[in-house]
Amino acid sequence: MELSPGASLDMSPEDGEDYEDYESLGQHVSVTTHMTAGAVAGVLEHTVMYPVDSVKTRMQSLQPDPNAQYRGVYQALKRIIQTEGLFRPLRGLNITMLGAGPAHALYFACYERVKRSLSDVIQSGGNSHLANGLAGSVATVLHDAIMNPAEVVKQRMQMYNSPYRGLLDCLQTVTRTEGLGAFYRSYSTQLTMNIPFQAVHFITYELMQEQLNPHRHYHPGSHIVSGAAAGAISAAITTPLDVCKTLLNTQENVALNSMNISGHLSGMANAFRTVYRLGGLAAFFKGAQARVIYQMPSTAIAWSVYEFFKYFLTKQRIEQEARQRPM
């Protein structure tokens, strides 16, 4: 029996099949399925919208070069391509893809496991928003442990006039001049940003699903809309923390020199003070438009791809088990 991508696994007893609806698949989905679906979703999430992420990094620069000052996302992309080459907005994509696969595999597998365990305790197996938020927070710790070094390399390669020739040159130069600790200098800030981001993200997604897809069938449209809404709200709320993270990752030389800061900036408190002294409250929202534009389709892609692969892989496994049963 074949199902279209928009169909659910909600089969009636008359069908004589041993299928269950999409919501009940959670208890049958293996960890391997969650990790595979998560890895594919993570890679696509980060690659499809990567040029906009590059723009966001540049627009968060506190003391940008006159040649790297942009009025908006479209104007920035057009100017970067015209002046620096067609593939310049993709610089750093390779390290992002290498990190996104394993990071999102652990992220979704951990989220599903912790959500189910906490929901059993908090709401007797029902959908608990507290469980969703806590599960998202726990999953973020694992995700960021893998992605933080990738973010450092990626953002340094995205900056205007980046001095690094490529991925290996960046890794070697940062390790030699700043030590391995440089790859985790923004980890605490990243967690401080991503824990509330992911808590709001998952709560919003599950809340939207309750409204748009109450029976929790596989329904691509609801996954896309819920994912986009979750990404936009979470991105807008946490932009100030993202600006601080970018400063810690890039160690923006012009900005730090203008503040007479020698050595390397470290710590979330120092980053907050530096951002405020350089640009006031407005500086905390630099790149907000690009961040929201990036996150909306990115999270929509991530959730729709993840839900599809979870649905498809589990459906294949159930069909295989049904064929192997004795008549």
Image: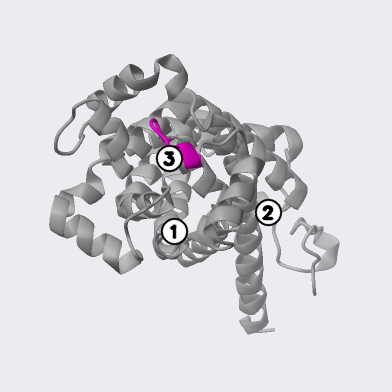
- Closest to the camera, between mark 2 and mark 3, is 3
Give the label on residue 100, or none. Answer: 1
**x, y (%) of residue 182?**
21, 48
**x, y (%) of residue 56?**
51, 41
Give the label on residue 220, or none. Answer: none
Q: Nearer the viewer, residue 113 or 95?
A: 95
Q: Which residues are magenta?
A: 61-68
Q: Main secondary structure of the magenta part?
A: loop
Q: Residue at x 34, y 31 (%)?
A: 192
- Closest to the camera, between mark 1 and mark 2, is 1
Q: CA distance from mark 1 to mark 3?
A: 19 Å
- Closest to the camera, between mark 1 and mark 3, is 1
Q: Report which quarter residue 21 is drawn in.
A: bottom right
What is the three-letter code of the residue carrying label 3? Ala
Question: Which residue is identified by label 2?
Answer: 22
What is the three-letter code of the residue carrying label 1? Ala
Q: CA distance from mark 1 to mark 2?
A: 26 Å
Give the label on residue 135, or none. Answer: 3
What is the three-letter code of the residue carrying label 2? Tyr
The relative height of residue 243 versus residue 40 in the rendered view (above or below) is above
Secondary structure of the residue carrying numbered label 2: helix
Secondary structure of the residue carrying numbered label 1: helix
